[in-house]
Image (spheres, helix red, strand yellow):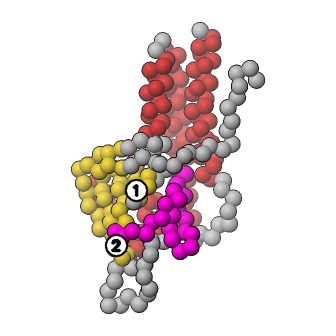
Amino acid sequence: MKNRIIVIFTIVTFIIGFMIAVQFQTTNEPERDTRSLFELRQALTTEKERQAELNREIDRQLELLYQLQQTEDVEDVMLDAIEELREQAGLTEMGGPGIIIEVKPIFDESYEGGAIRTVPPYLLRMLLNELNMSGAIEVAVGNERIITTTPIREVNGVTLINGSRMTQFPLTIKVLTNAPEDLHHAVMASQSREFFSYENFNLEVTPINYVKLPPYGNTLRVRYMNPIKEDS
């Protein structure tokens, strides 16, 4: 019985450690910060949400530890927990009610710029932050699932998400939410929509009863955490 409890505690500790490692990685990237005050405020709000989610995850894992201590069928409980973690990490396909946002360039008589190749990263980050604050559960931009560690950056004038080029228009953003109509109204009244118009982009937002999001397709890298051998 003692060995069983040790095994259970080790497994749950590993899960909590994984969550903490991901949180540490996403908040400690060593790079020069050139963001505006508005972007810094948005980033602060996002980090507070991540911290709250981490606290909720620790509570869930402590509850899981209690369940494991109370049952003899440890394997089934752990398989269910692993599948739940895969869903939370964005590694599985998900579907449900939500909204679809289409980003399209605007070319009117007043436009004097060159060809629009891509949506600037700061606009996408601003929109994603506002979606998260307004009730979004899961998001995919193009064919790329957005997870905690998703990088959104510009390389040679082209925006990359998870390493994939975002150069096709309309750029489709799929969002899962429990309240599609509320999120639709929030996007239409958002500050990010106004900033998109400044950059000659229009947002078309459609509530939908069912939208399907692809899974995250890249390999997850976990740093700052190593397995410990049983005899160490």
Label 2 residue SS: strand
Q: Which portion, as a residue range, is magenta?
A: 148-170
Q: Which mark is residue 210?
A: none
The amino acid sitting under disc 2 is Lys
Q: Confirm whether residue 178 shows in the render.
A: no
Q: Position of residue 91 (x, y in %)?
A: 45, 42
**Looking at the image, residue 161 lies above or below residue 64:** below
Q: Are marks 1 and 2 in contact (CB under 8 Å)?
A: no
For this rendering, which residue is in front, 50 or 159? 159
Q: CA distance from mark 1 to mark 2?
A: 17 Å
Q: Confirm whether residue 100 shows in the render.
A: yes
> Can residue 229 be found in the magenta stretch?
no
Image quadrant assignment for residue 131: bottom left
At x 50% / y 68%, what residue is drawn?
A: 159
**Looking at the image, residue 207 lies above or below residue 62:** below
Residue 170 relative to residue 28: left or right: left
Which residue is the site of mark 2?
104
**Looking at the image, residue 157 lies above or below residue 55:** below
Q: Considering the image in quadrants, where does the N terminus appear?
A: top right
Q: Which residue sits furthest right?
A: 232
Q: Position of residue 43 (x, y in %)?
A: 55, 60
- Which mark lies nearer to you, 1 or 2? 1
Image quadrant assignment for residue 191: bottom left
Q: Which residue sits furthest top?
A: 1
Q: Considering the image in quadrants, where does the C terminus appear?
A: top right
At x 51% / y 49%, what residue is drawn?
A: 218
Q: Which mark is residue 143?
A: 1
At x 44% / y 52%, what residue is drawn?
A: 145
* Crowding near the residue tagged with mark 2, few <14, some 14–19, many ≥20 C-alpha atoms within 10 Å: some
